[in-house]
Image (cartoon, grey):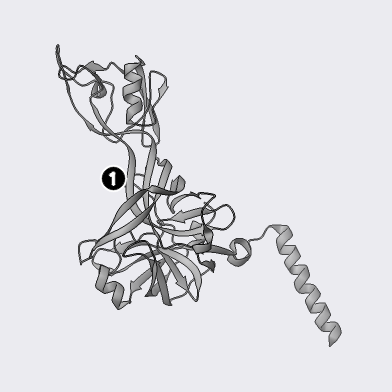
Amino acid sequence: MCKLKRSFLFLIVFAALLVASCGFPCTAYAVHGEVYLGGMPAGFTLGMGGAQVVGICEVLTEEGVVCPARDAGMKVGDIICSIGGMDIENAADIDRAISAGNTGEITYLRGEEELHGRVLPAKDMASGRMRLGVLVRDSVSGIGTVTYIQKGDLRFGSLGHAVSDGKGKLLHAENGNIYQCSIVSVVRGERGRAGELKGLFLNDARVAVADKNCETGIYGNFRKETDCSRFRSVPVAETARPGNARIVTTTDGVIPAEYDICIVKVDEGNKQNKNFVIKITDEALLETTGGIVQGMSGSPILQDGKLVGAVTHVFLNDPTRGYGISIINMLGN
């Protein structure tokens, strides 16, 4: 019997070594271990890698009304990348490029397509300044929730979904600043109308830098000097199951709290950040928010004390219900 036990143990060890040597995937515990739990609100200010056109207008000159941007073929939604060979990172760069006489070819993005045109700025008769005839923005701001922070490199994941424009197009967000945020009020969700967390950016408290906006959220790194002793460490679970769970979110101030939910359905094969259907069951949270509201995206979902995912969407026809993304789909970005 002892020989059989030793042989069986040898086979287990050999199989484990074989799996590792062949590169087969291991469980989430072996790969990801533990992470710091999020749930805290964050103010996101994301640079766009250029200046996005949000309006096209005419310029009144001594010779009449003109629109250089329209003549160059530009449309609302385009992102200006360079003017006359000078890179454009923000709205101020446009004025600098024009003032320096860097006119001529303009390069801009329309979706994933890079386009080129010729632009001749016009002198505005009222201000005396050179204009392109565009209204632009160079950043996007909003409130969301940090899901987790990885130990070691302090890389974080948040939101669980991409930041997109009004047409659903993924924004070219980069070089973003993440600030500490305090929730000051809540607009309760109602059937047919999404609620909202309203927060105040604490602009003197930049906590992280974002470098990636993709289908599964916003990612980046917390500052190296971050005090991690205040964060709770939790194991990462590879899978979830229908049943009771909890979410960690903040509805007042800066301190997260846990609330009861139910995971109604699990679909780990879904590729649209909708791996779970969840239902808020906590009476205190329902009283405060009416259910899931804007700003709660990224709120961690815990089951059996393990991190299984994050809140991503709310059902407009029933704010007590919404979708969640599996944590495995967020890790590694």
214 vs 314, left or right, is: right
Q: Looking at the rendering, which quadrant does residue 246 occupy? A: bottom left
Q: Tell me residue 171's x, y (percent).
A: 37, 42
Q: Is residue 215 visible?
A: yes
181 or 156, nearer to the observer: 181
- Nearer to us in this view, 269 or 222: 222
Q: Residue at x 27, y 73 (%)?
A: 286
Q: Residue furthest right?
A: 3
- Residue that protrudes farthest toward the top in the picture: 63
Q: Is residue 220 left or right of residue 281?
A: right
Left or right of 72 in this view: 8? right
Q: Secondary structure at mark 1?
A: loop
Indicate whether 160 appears above or below 265. Answer: above
Question: To which quarter of the image does residue 287 belong?
Answer: bottom left
Quarter occupied by the N terminus:
bottom right
> Which residue lies under the disc numbered 1?
167
**Residue farthest bottom in this picture:** 1
Q: Which image quarter: residue 30?
A: bottom right
Q: Inspect the image, locate mark 1, and give the three-letter code of the amino acid beneath it.
A: Lys
Q: Nearer the viewer, residue 316 or 46?
A: 46
Q: Is residue 294 visible?
A: no
Q: Residue 133 location in percent, x, y?
A: 23, 24
Give the residue at x 79% y 78%. Answer: 8
